[in-house]
Image: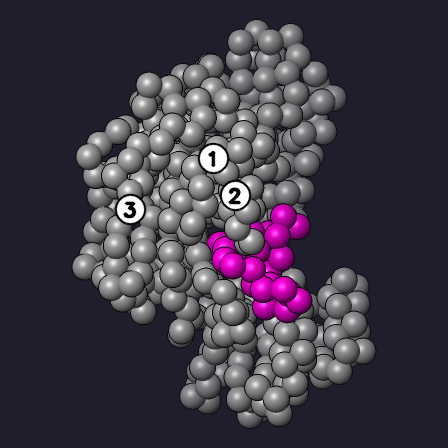
Amino acid sequence: MNGSTVAIIGLGASGVAAARLALAKGADVYVSDLHTEPAVATRGADLRGAGARVDVGEHDLERMARADLVVVSPGIPPRAPVLRALEDRGVGWISEPEFAVRFFSGSLIGITGTNGKTTTALLVAHLLEAAGVRAAVGGNVGGGLAPPASELALLAEPPDWYVLEMSSFQLADVETFRPDIGVVTNLAPDHLDRYEGVAAYYADKARMLERASADSVWVLPAADTVVTKWMGDTPGSRFFFGEQEDTGTHAFSTQGFLTLRVDHSTHRLISDSDLPLLGRHNRHNALAAALTASLAGASCQGIATGLLSARPLPHRLEPVIERDGVLWVNDSKATNVAATRSALSSLSRPVVLLVGGKDKGEDFSCLVPADATVKAVLTYGAAGQRISSEVSVAEFVPGDLRAVTTRASSIAASGDVILLSPACSSFDMFVNYEERGRHFSELAREAA
């Protein structure tokens, strides 16, 4: 790409990584962002020092229109004026991971779905490394847990496998993206504040399937009718993970053990109780990751070793503290109804649920699954009153997160779980779900 011109929209982590990759490949780089906060200005100054042309607070549409390639960060909504203006000029764009994979030199595992993507992606890489297979993980992971895809393209020593978590926003703008192994954790309504409906959300996810061939390998949840319909007649080999042993399931739990069936042989990995990750849905994530790692060449012994050394991720059903028999759990990453339902179904103890935040337009009437033991549902924030009107057992608590945790403390008794699993985004009160989770954890330790 030496001598090409690349325009990059957005000065977040993905935009900066794409700019550095483009500069390293000899491109003439232009980056712009409408935001002018000090952190954005600092990142812009750093890129200017590296040789890029940077605008903060404005976009130079004519410069973008003349570029050979336009790369868009995932935080830029599809109806943003800058994108509509480019579209009017007949200019297309690609996502940052699409740009990055053009410079990858190893095999690719792409992981998408509605919930569990980050846990599964990081766990796949961890299991591969534990088995002696070189892996590098990145993409939509966020939270400082892994870098954007473009940083992986700059690694001095390419891995055997690149592992990318891919959001619907990133998949919407791919052209050549084609994983050797594609993983789907699950599908459920999400981001309805950005999409016109569930069908549009699923359609962007399905961009991962468009370049599939007979050589493609797919890791899918067993007996999931939504995913089955979504996959349609996509070519490639299909492998399934699920809770129950079945003739068509390749990773499952049986007789208290996580188990793989590969090459017509059955291999016990570890006992369910030895998995360090809390909740039934994390058992599903572990089965998906173990099956994926096996298909990528990891030994069963290496996978078992990796599962035993796995650690809970921040803000994802993360135990914070237990005092006087009450366990406080931070599941701030649960930003949709399906994630909260999954968390509730995963816990065997009575739950005092904290739910609320910025309303994303979902239906909350099905928030509490039939198999959950819920002692109380406390709602808060911008969506709190609507949630309480749709969930018959819910109580709206006015005020901030401290107010709702104080109320939870007054209800919970020994043996209970106080669970922050908001089913909403954080933007009514917090910068992101990480800040919300950290604040909850601080309040939990203070209360305990």
What crowding class fits label 2: few (fewer than 14 Cα within 10 Å), some (14-19), or many (20 or more)?
many
Instruction: Please report the residue visible at 38 percent of the width from the left and 66 percent of the height from the top.
Output: 178
Residues in magenta?
136-165
Q: CA distance from mark 3 to mark 1?
A: 20 Å
When the figure is inspected, residue 261 is found, relative to residue 354, above or below; the finding is: below
Residue 260 visible within the image: yes
| Residue 212 image position (x, y, % from top left) | 30, 65
Residue 257 placement, left or right of 349: left
Q: Which residue is mark 3?
A: 239
Front residue of this view, candidates 366 and 51: 51
Does 139 appear in magenta?
Answer: yes
- In the picture, the disc for residue 301 is 1
| Residue 28 image position (x, y, % from top left) | 65, 87
Residue 214 placement, left or right of 145: left
Q: CA distance from mark 2 to mark 1?
A: 7 Å
Front residue of this view, candidates 403 and 299: 299
- In the picture, the disc for residue 341 is none
Badge 3 element: strand
The residue type indicated by label 3 comes to Phe
Instruction: Please report the residue visible at 32 percent of the width from the left and 56 percent of the height from the top.
Output: 217
Closer mark to the observer between disc 3 and disc 1? 1
The residue type indicated by label 1 comes to Gln
Q: Which residue is mark 2?
A: 131
